[in-house]
Image: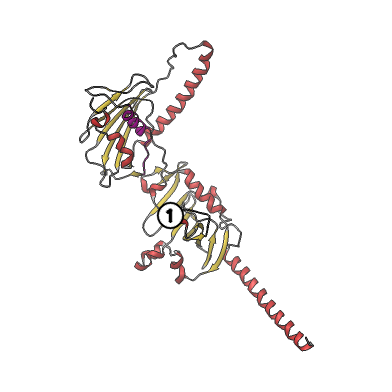
Amino acid sequence: MNRKQFLWLMLVVLLLGGVSIALFWQDITLYRDSGAKIGARLMPELKISDVAKLRLQDADKEVTLALKDKVWRVEQRGGYPADFAEISGLILKLLDVKVVQTEPVGASLHPRLNLLAPDKAANDKGAKEGTGTLMELSDASGKVLVSLVLGKVSLKKDPMNPLPNAKDGVPAGRHVLVAGRGDSVAVVSDPLEKAVTAPGAWVAKDFFKADRIRTLQLAGEGASSWKIARDEEWGQWKFAAGGGQLHPSAAVTATNALGSLAFSDVVIDDKAGAGKAAVLTAETFDNLTYTVKLAPLANGDFVLRYTVAGTPPKTRKPEAKEKPEDVAKLDKDFADNLQRLEARVMLEQARSQWAYVVPGKMAAPLLMKREQMAVPGR
């Protein structure tokens, strides 16, 4: 290589180096302008203690979760208590989520990444498919702390995942457009899949629990009436009246179904499930009476309304052949159980003011006909 060729080579190296440095500083400027650096948290300025309201909205639905009297509630469900664990879990994820990529994306390209805000989509009939999920966090005064649009979920190939729905990849991140950061779109390290807009997904799912059942009766229009009973908690179930022999498994199925009921949503329409209702009455060994009304819906589910009456016994009935040295322990266990039971009943009575949607398959064991519960031929 002669001197002239060497000088030309050095010039090319310097030019390439200059371009690289320029691009580097350009990227740094973009990161600073966007407020989201690679590897940094998306929301470093957000404090969970400041958040008193969370609003989620997409093209079809909206849910508002608000902290009132130290209890999170779902506004679209008549102020029904919300699941605090789900709310705090989503906010904590937003606090911890990291930026893995950032780049400027013009507004005209936002629909391709499902980053169109719902309010803009409402003004553009053809933009619904490109609409994202608006996530807005506010403080107790109503001041918006954070407003962002959650867009398209990014997938990561996982050849070792055998599930059919993982053939295109598994959710690994999400495109996010944060208000106040211009056109800078970030891809974050979590898909934030819990950010759903269905109000029913956010209600607290703890339900009444009718256990230690002594008698269970089904009555009402459209129901095949029956009543089953047992004398002792671990005793044999029998029909309380009428002919026929009760099948033991039928009694267990019915009582277990009542004790493990779950609901899918809360009903705020007083007219919902206003048709003919079957009535279940359960009396327990704790002196409690649960009255449950089940009204069918057109889709096969039921609207459930219930009441709880009675007061648990305050004193313990001594056990047969009880040893003196065991009395103190038995008394303490009884007092502890009574305290938990009274707290549970208080919560159940407070929640009885609402009506609930119960899946048809969960209600079916409670609506068996008498002939279905009897031993065939007896």
Picture quarter containing residue 270? top left
Q: Main secondary structure of the magenta part?
A: helix
Q: In the rendering, at what x and y percent does residue 95 appear?
A: 55, 53
Q: Which residues are magenta?
A: 248-264
Judged left or right of residue 24, residue 377 is left
> Does residue 90 belong to the magenta stretch?
no
Where 39 falls versus 141 (above or below)? Answer: below
Instruction: Specify the quadrant that holds the N terminus.
Output: bottom right
Q: Residue furthest left?
A: 221
Q: Residue furthest right?
A: 3
Picture quarter containing residue 79? top left
Q: In the rendering, at what x and y percent does residue 283 appear?
A: 33, 25
Judged left or right of residue 315, residue 218 is left
The residue pinned by badge 1 equals 56
Q: In the rendering, at what x and y percent does residue 26 appear?
A: 62, 72
Judged left or right of residue 82, residue 239 is left
> Does residue 259 belong to the magenta stretch?
yes
Tell me what residue is drawn at x 31 percent, y 38 percent.
363
Q: Is residue 326 visible?
A: yes
Tell me what residue is drawn at x 38 percent, y 67 percent.
127
